[in-house]
Amino acid sequence: AMVIAGACKRTRTLHQLKMTHNPIGRRGGQAMFKMLRVLKEEDPQVDLTGCNVAKTQVKLPDRLEPLFEFSNPAGVYELHLERPYDAMCAYELLELAWNEEGENMKNETLDGNPFNLAEPNGFKDGRVTDYYRLPDEYAEEETAHVLKLEYESTRHCPHSEDKINPRQWKMLEDLMEGAASMAVNVLEVAASVCYFDVEQAKEVVHKVRYSA
């Protein structure tokens, strides 16, 4: 689900994404909420009704480090851009850096050479790939690129424009409706990557209380 969500933000040809009743897990849920922050009304219609966002133990082949943590991305990364998962991580870090304060990506290298990733000021909730592309993540293994960097997170205090948008809210409702017993898990996932205003928070609490 993490890779699918990342790919949806980099494509203009997908019209519908239907993943109903799949165990996408906590990180998959976070990725989908973040995807819907970026996608606009004319972008793919997404149906996640009944998906399970409970914590799951997921391991990727030949990978020892933990999976990408959307709510705590700080760390050191070595990303092989021909691998779909690594490409997803690279674009998530780029999107975060474009939305956070200051310089977040440090000591970047590409194939062992110094490499400066763009970090413009004032970017807000759009498709990063409309303005900037990483070196070809679709390259063959023998010509693939390795991106290394350190990421320092500088999350800003949320403002009114940061609150959960209508598409994210619809996903929240669909997940709660499809798995009422998991309402608390759904809320925990949403709250880790979304912000609620006072009225939205009241309504969410009401939904959780009466879903049991």
Image (cartoon, rainbow, N blue to C red):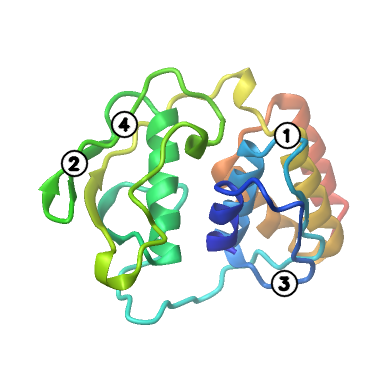
At 67% across and 72% down in the image, what residue appears?
Answer: 23
Can the viewer see residue 95?
Answer: yes
**Residue at label 2?**
115
Can you tell which of label 3 and label 2 is closer to the viewer? 2
**Residue 102 pos. (x, y %):** 30, 24
**Residue at label 1?**
201
Query: Which three-letter amino acid code belongs to the residue tagged 2?
Result: Phe
Position of residue 158 in the picture relative to residue 137 (left or right):
right
Secondary structure category for the residue under label 4: loop
Query: On screen, 33 above or below 85?
Result: above
**Residue at label 3?**
22
Query: On screen, 52 above or below 118?
Result: below
How far apart marks 3 and 2 lie (CA) works out to 39 Å
Query: On screen, 76 above or below 154?
Result: below
**Residue 117 pos. (x, y %):** 28, 37
* Cβ–Cβ under 8 Å for marks 3 and 2: no
